[in-house]
Image: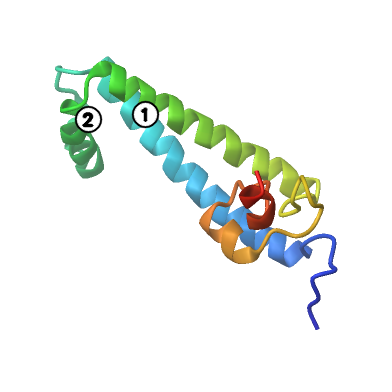
């Protein structure tokens, strides 16, 4: 029987979140690399043009200014850093614990925002 008094997620649960985070991290890294490539190769055609994902992102990014693309890349990098920090919390078995209340953050919230460090209650009371 699961109670709200648990202080941490089980190793199996942590493994599930780890896989989710690694998947998001992989995608985020690819998006970041694509943005960087768009910024640095704004107008020259290179091999990456053949990638369908790159094409879509490049066409979207071509309407963005270099500055806007740079801001997106920065935001993506920050997201990557948050995901990497979440992986460290998994290794330390502190993942999913609200840093303000010390209670477990709901699985629903963590699935939606896997790098969350605050429960909804703590976030809403800010």
Above or below, comparing residue 84 to residue 114 in the picture: above
Q: Give the residue displayed 48% in from the left and 29% down from the top.
A: 77
Mark 2 neighbour class, 10 Å CA radius: few under 14, some 14 to 19, many 20 or more: many
Q: Are marks 1 and 2 in contact (CB under 8 Å)?
A: yes
Give the mark nearer the N terminus: 1 vs 2: 2
Choose top left, top right, bottom left or bottom right for residue 1. Answer: bottom right
Residue at image mark 1? 72
**Picture coordinates of residue 41, whole percent (x, y):** 23, 17
Q: In this view, does 77 lie to the left or right of 12?
A: left
Q: Where is residue 94 in the image (x, y as percent from the top left)?
A: 79, 49
Q: Is 101 on the left-hand or right-hand side of 38?
A: right
Q: In this view, does 26 lie to the left or right of 89?
A: left
**In the rendered view of the protein, which quadrant contains the C terminus?**
top right
- Distance CA(mark 1)–CA(mark 2): 10 Å
The residue closer to the viewer here, 73 or 23, is: 73
Element type where label 1 sits in the image: helix
Residue farthest to the bottom, as pictured? 1
**Residue occupying the point 20% across, 18% down:** 42
**Label 1 crowding class (10 Å Cα cut-off): few <14, some 14-19, many 20+?**
some
Question: To which quarter of the image does residue 120 belong?
Answer: bottom right
Q: Estimate the x, y position of residue 40 in percent, counting from the top left.
A: 28, 16
Q: Badge 2 is on which residue?
A: 61
- Tally the numbered discs: 2
| Of the pair 108 and 35, the residue shown nearer to us | 108
Determine the secondary structure under disc 2: helix
Quadrant of the rendered image containing residue 76: top left
Residue pushed farthest front? Answer: 125
In the rendered image, residue 25, in percent from the top left (x then y), is placed at 51, 43
Q: Which mark is residue 93?
A: none
Q: Residue at x 36, y 29 (%)?
A: 72
């Amino acid at each position: 029987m699961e109670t709200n008094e648990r202080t941490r997620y089980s190793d199996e649960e942590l493994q599930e979140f780890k896989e989710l985070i690694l998947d998001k991290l992989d995608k985020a890294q690819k998006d970041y690399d694509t943005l960087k490539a768009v910024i640095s190769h704004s107008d020259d055609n290179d091999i990456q043009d053949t990638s369908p994902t790159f094409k879509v992102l490049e066409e979207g990014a071509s309407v963005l200014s270099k500055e806007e693309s740079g801001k997106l890349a920065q935001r993506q990098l920050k997201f990557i850093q948050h995901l990497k920090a979440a992986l460290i919390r998994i290794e330390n078995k502190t993942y999913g614990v609200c840093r303000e209340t010390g209670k477990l953050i709901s699985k629903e919230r963590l699935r939606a925002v896997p790098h969350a460090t605050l429960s909804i209650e703590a976030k809403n009371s800010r």
